Image (tube, rainbow, N blue to C red):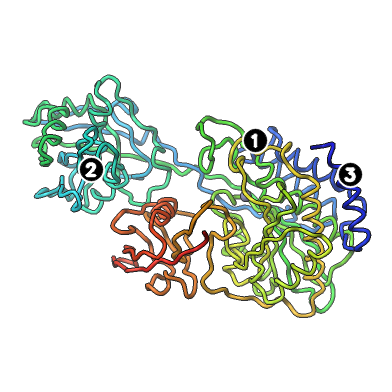
Amino acid sequence: MTRLVRPHLVALGLILTLCGGISLGLDALTINKRIKSDVEYLASDELEGRGLSTKGIEKAAGFIRDQFKQLGLASGTSDGSYFQYFDVWLSSRLLKDKTSMRITGPKDSVEKLTLGEDYQPLAYGGNGTFDAPIVFAGYGITSEEHGYDDYKDLDVEGKVVLVIRREPQQTDPESVFDGDELTEHASILTKMRNAHGRRAAALLLVSDPTTTPDVDDDSLVPVDYLGFKSPLSMPMAQISRKTVEKLLAQTPLKGLKEVEKAIDKDLKPRSVPLTGLGAEGSFAFERVKARVPNVIGVLEGKGPKADETIVVGAHFDHLGYGGMGSLAPKKTREIHNGADDNASGTACLIELARATAQRGVPPRRVVFIAFCGEERGLLGSRHYTKKDPIFSLDGTVAMMNFDMVGRLDEDKLTVFGTGSAKQFDEMVERLNGPRKFSLKKITGGTGASDHTSFYVAGIPVLHFFTGSHRDYHRPSDDADKINVVGIRRIADYADAILQELLEMKERPEYVKLKDEDPHAGMDISSTGPRPYLGTLPDYEDEVDGCLLNGVQPGSPAQKAGLKEGDIITAIDGKPVHTVREYATRLYRCKPGATVTITIKRGEEKKDLEVKLGSRGG
Ligand SMILES: [Zn+2]
């Protein structure tokens, strides 16, 4: 590939010279060198994948700040640090000295359980204490569809509920529970929700004998098995087979294998209070947080429009050593270098800052922001727009964003937001003229990057993207796969757009788009039409269900009466606990089908009929 660069450059230089379109300066080779070195540094192992809790993210932030300083940009924060800090909730840590559990038996007998051996609290249930009789509730399943209810005639309010993991008849191909496949009733989340809805004091889970036939092979899941946030807040723990077998031996149930066999045989629940047995416990977690910065540099403008702002942004964080957000097939700790995502956009941002600064004092203010926390749900840009917009959002006339611009292939460039202001489509086309990108224009101003935070705040946006690829969110997103010349060409194009935005007499006129497809251009589904609902989910995901930040005007969601603040808890009766689950369920529906969406609105629960639209194909 390297050999191809030179002739390509010569040809490009010729074209640009002839058309007079270049705006970053003629020294393309120098610019290429800088971009290459920026990407290589940001995506080097030394920066540890720019994970939020690493030293690498501090180094990256420091590097960007130093670049901004050298270019003569002023600090965007009043303390002169260039750093706008905010807190990110990274994980939950079990406080071992504040966590305990005991089983109380007949005649005041007490057995203290050993943490990590006899029981393991799950962060998903959050903090809490309990002291109540134990009720055995079979698999903890209530399913009308399967005519099966472990809670039939059972009152568990205020009780500690003990349930078996997974579901009955797991190995039976004829099972009503989807043959030998698992249904969602097997999921701990469904069991948790069921017990929580019945106001249980705590939920205890035990491995099913089918999956764990040998009591000695039982292993307890890690504390963060279901994630580290606790939307339902009800103490929850896995307890060992050994502990449970001891308990059941004192009851007519005898043992778990016996219970499993009996239920498998006739699908009749075997739920029963464990008379005389109780559990008391106290689980305590603490939030592990990180303080991370957006890096903000400013070029103040001069003249009548000096108080109007244009934001140019790119996120500089990535996935660190993997974990949440990683698509690596193996869940081992491995540095995710994120060369395309988003060292490429960061390098582009720095070049734009350089070109703009070299041109002297602009007629409008330009605020360059390297966002942090994007990979965790646009946290940095949300912090800036919702909590601490340093420069008034009303006075912010446009935002440009770069996320994954390092894989330019066959000149294909996707630009989002071309319909987010009246002037954008024409401008984007015209300035592309001499540059000859094969443009894919997406009118919508929302999508999976930081421009979304600005668009929903009423600001016209343009977002640049060279497309998804096999290395996306994997450890193989490395610097040697980056099209450096491509980044320079995109920076050159964006620079021309930025110059025009700076000079425009009137500010771009914001367009609130109707019926927008938030997944347009994202290559989420490769072929065929997709079902379309038209929701704007909240990717911060701290509730049980999928919280909506809004719905697209004119969309099926709006027609059905869905609103901002609604929490989607089920689609066609199938539970939705997270944004991801929501997306999965939705994409399994047929385009054009009528489905029932269950929502929580305040304390109210509602079922809404929605006729889905269709997109793509
Ligand atoms: Zn990204």
Q: Position of residue 254 (x, y in %)?
A: 10, 27
Task: Look at label 2 and name its amino acid.
Answer: Phe
Look at 90% across and 63% down and name the residue there.
19
Q: Earlier in the sequence, mark 3 or mark 2?
A: 3
Q: Quadrant of residue 51?
A: top right
**Res. 161 visible in picture:** no
Direction from residue 409 to residue 167 in the image, left or right: left
- Name the disc covering residue 529, or none: none
* Marks 1 & 2, CB-CB < 8 Å contact: no
- Please tell me which residue lies in front, 133 or 505: 505
Name the front one of labels 1 and 2. 2
Q: Residues within 10 Å of mark 1 (few under 14, many from 20)?
A: many
Direction from residue 498 to residue 389 in the image, left or right: left
Q: Residues within 10 Å of mark 2 (few under 14, many from 20)?
A: many
Mark 2 residue element: loop
- Name the disc covering residue 177, or none: 2
Query: Disc 3 designates what residue?
Result: 7
Does the beta carbon at disc 2 come under 8 Å from ligand 1? Answer: no
Task: Look at label 1 and name its amino acid.
Answer: Glu
Q: CA distance from mark 3 to mark 1?
A: 35 Å
Q: Earlier in the sequence, mark 3 or mark 1?
A: 3
**Res. 463 visible in picture:** yes
Mark 3 residue element: helix
Q: Residues within 10 Å of mark 3 (few under 14, many from 20)?
A: few
- Please tell me which residue lies in front, 223 or 597: 597
Query: Disc 1 designates what residue?
Result: 48
